[in-house]
Amino acid sequence: MTRPRTVCNVPGCPNLAVERGRCQLHQRQAWDGKRNFEGYKGDWLKIRAQVLKEEPICRRCRSRPSVTVDHIKPRLEGGSEGRFNLQGLCKICRRQKDAEDAARGKKRHAEKL
């Protein structure tokens, strides 16, 4: 049995949702930052290994091991792939940084509307 379609969960949008609670107009683009996506292969894996070797301790909290590499200035905000724009972070600090980046992105998106 299929569930009835719902209204888009973007405030003020009257369109019917097609996937993940959003209408066709408000669908989010898939994030291409996962390792297996285009743009994060070959050279990226070498750069990532270099950053984690150079920064074994999280640059933010300076107490836990770095396990992930983060763009200081996100690519969507004009950040580059250069070493100067990369930092090693622990999982906790990475989640916090991602939340901050997402909040800025949502604010930017809301200002465009």
Image (tube, helix red, strand yellow):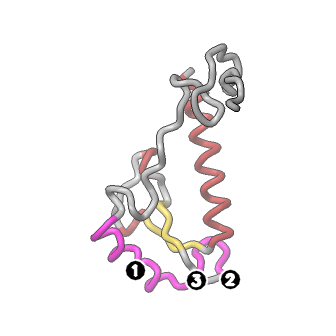
Verify CB contact (< 8 Å) between mark 2 and mark 3: yes
Residue type of the residue flagged with mark 1: Ala
Q: Amino acid at mark 2?
A: Ser
- How far from the left and from the top, in percent, is residue 66? 56, 79
Task: Determine whether 104 is above or below 62 in the image.
Answer: above
**Circle 1: is it few (<14), some (14-19), or many (20+) Cα within 10 Å?**
some
Residue that protrudes farthest toward the top in the picture: 14
10 Å crowding of disc 2: few (<14), some (14-19), many (20+) = few
The mark that comes first in sequence, 2 or 3, is 3
Residue sitting at 47 percent across and 44 percent down?
Answer: 30
- Please tell me whether mark 1 sits on a helix, a strand or a loop: helix
Left or right: where 27 falls relative to 46 = right
Q: CA distance from mark 2 to mark 1?
A: 20 Å
Give the amino acid at mark 3.
Answer: Ile
Disc number lying in front (2 or 1): 1
Numbered range of the magenta stretch: 41-62
Describe the element under mark 3 as helix, strand or loop. Answer: loop
In this figure, which residue is indicated by the disc labeled 3? 57
Residue for badge 1 = 49
Residue at coordinates 40% horizontally, 47% vertically from top-left? 78
Query: Residue at position x 52%, y 24% from top?
Result: 24
Q: Is residue 55 magenta?
A: yes
Circle 2 residue: 63
